[in-house]
Image (cartoon, grey):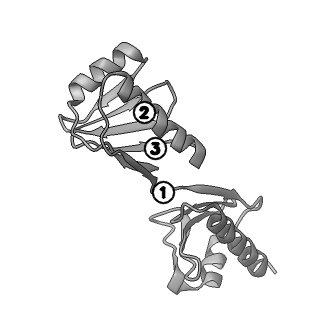
Amino acid sequence: MGSGELGRELDLEAVIESLKDEFDVESNRHGSSMVTIRLEAGGPALTLYRTGTYQIRGTDSRDTLYKANMELLDALESIGVELMDSSFEQNNAVYLEDFGTTIQLEALALHLGLENVEYEPEQFPGVIYRPSDIGTVNLIFSSGKTIISGTIRDEIAEQSAEHIRNQLETVNT
């Protein structure tokens, strides 16, 4: 996910109507202060706020996130929206790793240490693990998959996955 600032307020109604003339836009209005659009079917979700801020979600890589940003800015300029000092940055990323084995969550939670783990199977079907030396948040499931968040850097996500892989080897021996 990324967010940006267009450097100006938007008349969302006029923007959506103009975009519909140029693109096959899907839109979902959330009152008068925000709207979520897609410039193409199945494309990233672009949430525009009346204040001129925006968010982009639903891309599969950093490159496609920044490409979606450029496509949004180009689309706005093509309908006559003058952009002042626009800015954009990636705020979040979610990574998925599959360890290829089933995981005994109770044993893993105990092994990882209760100070770094939340495990309440009645509330959530996975272990929430926060390795203190890496800074990520990992949702680990019995299916052998983990979701890694808390970083936008691929190498940190890879370090977190490798750390869990090593812990799984230790707990299974």
Residue 6 is situated, as x and y percent measured from the top left of the image, at 31, 42
Report x, y in % for residue 109.
60, 78
Q: Is residue 172 left or right of residue 82?
A: right
Is the residue marked by circle 3 packed among few (<14), some (14-19), or many (20+) residues within 10 Å? some
Q: Which of labels 2 and 3 is toward the front?
A: 2
* Residue hosting label 2: 72
Q: Residue at x 28, y 19 (%)?
A: 17
* Residue name at image x 20 percent, y 30 percent: 11
Q: Estimate the x, y position of residue 122 in percent, counting from the top left.
A: 47, 66
Residue 92's label in the rendered image is 1
Q: Give the amino acid at mark 2.
A: Leu
What residue is drawn where x is 62% and y is 75%? Answer: 106
Q: CA distance from mark 3 to mark 1?
A: 9 Å
Residue 66 in the image: state x and y as whole percent: 52, 43
Q: Are marks 2 and 1 in contact (CB under 8 Å)?
A: no
- Name the residue nearer the viewer: 144 or 18: 18
Give the residue at mark 3: 57
Observer able to see residue 134: yes
Amino acid type, residue under disc 3 in the picture = Arg
Q: Are marks 2 and 3 in contact (CB under 8 Å)?
A: no
Q: Which mark is residue 117?
A: none
Q: Quadrant of residue 80?
A: top left
As helix, strand or loop, the secondary structure at mark 2 comes to helix
SS state under label 3: strand
Q: Secondary structure at mark 1?
A: loop
Q: Which picture quadrant has residue 162?
A: bottom right
Q: 120 and 150: which one is in front?
A: 150
Question: If the image is split into quadrants, where does the C terminus sit?
Answer: bottom right
Horizontal side, residue 13 vs residue 110: left or right:
left
Q: Residue at x 23, y 30 (%)?
A: 12
Q: Earlier in the sequence, mark 3 or mark 1?
A: 3
* Residue 61 visible within the image: no
